[in-house]
Image (spheres, rainbow, N blue to C red):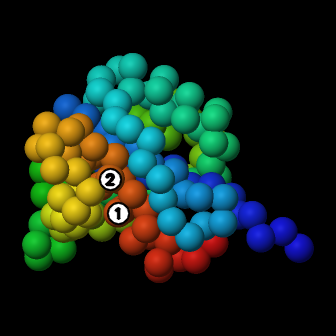
Amino acid sequence: MSIIKDRILALDVGDKRIGVAVSDPFGFSGTPLGIIQNNEKAFEKIKEYINQYKPKKIIIGLPLTLKGEEGEQAKKTKAFAEKLKEKIPDIDIVFEDERFTTSIAEERLSLAVKNKKKMKKKLDSVSAVVILESYLSKNPL
């Protein structure tokens, strides 16, 4: 019996940038992979990550309001997910509530990175890690 699990890719989709993270081979935690620009080339970059890490699933952070409702940003995120599904139909896409992930990511980064400019560059990918780890904590592999 193998303890190595299927990997999961996580995306923190913003208007300008997309943070990307991947689960470790054991399904315990996530690793930030970086950010990609949210434009038409984003789907090609996501395909590159899929080819490299062979995830069975993509988790996309869904930005709900504080009341747990879907606002304008959630609609944009779902539209992005639909387009991604059209371009990559053979992979499951799951949404994960991403409320407070940026705050959690900022807190984690502030402990490790003192330079604000460096912190801002890493924030989206660390937010993707927080989204992924939130999903993993509720859905162990």
Q: Separation of disc 2 and disc 1 at Cα?
A: 6 Å
- The answer to whether 28 appears left or right of 51 in the picture is left
Q: Residue at x 55, y 30 (%)?
A: 47
* Dot 2 alpha-carbon crowd within 10 angstroms: few under 14, some 14 to 19, many 20 or more: many
**Residue 87: x %, y % from top left:** 52, 30
- The answer to whether 52 appears left or right of 71 in the picture is right
Front position in the image: 75 or 98 = 98
Type of the residue with mark 1:
Val
- The answer to whether 115 appears left or right of 112 in the picture is left
- The answer to whether 101 appears left or right of 3 in the picture is left
The residue that disc 1 covers is 130
Question: Total marks drawn?
Answer: 2
Front position in the image: 119 or 94 = 119
Which element is circle 1 on? helix
Which element is circle 2 on? helix
Type of the residue with mark 2:
Val
* Dot 1 alpha-carbon crowd within 10 angstroms: few under 14, some 14 to 19, many 20 or more: many
Q: Quadrant of residue 122?
A: top left
> What's the mark number on residue 126?
2
Q: Residue at x 40, y 44 (%)?
A: 20
* 2 and 1 marks in contact (CB < 8 Å): yes
Residue furthest to the top in view is 41
**Residue 89: x %, y % from top left:** 58, 39
Q: Is residue 79 visible?
A: no
Residue 47 to residue 25: above or below: above
Q: Quadrant of residue 141?
A: bottom right
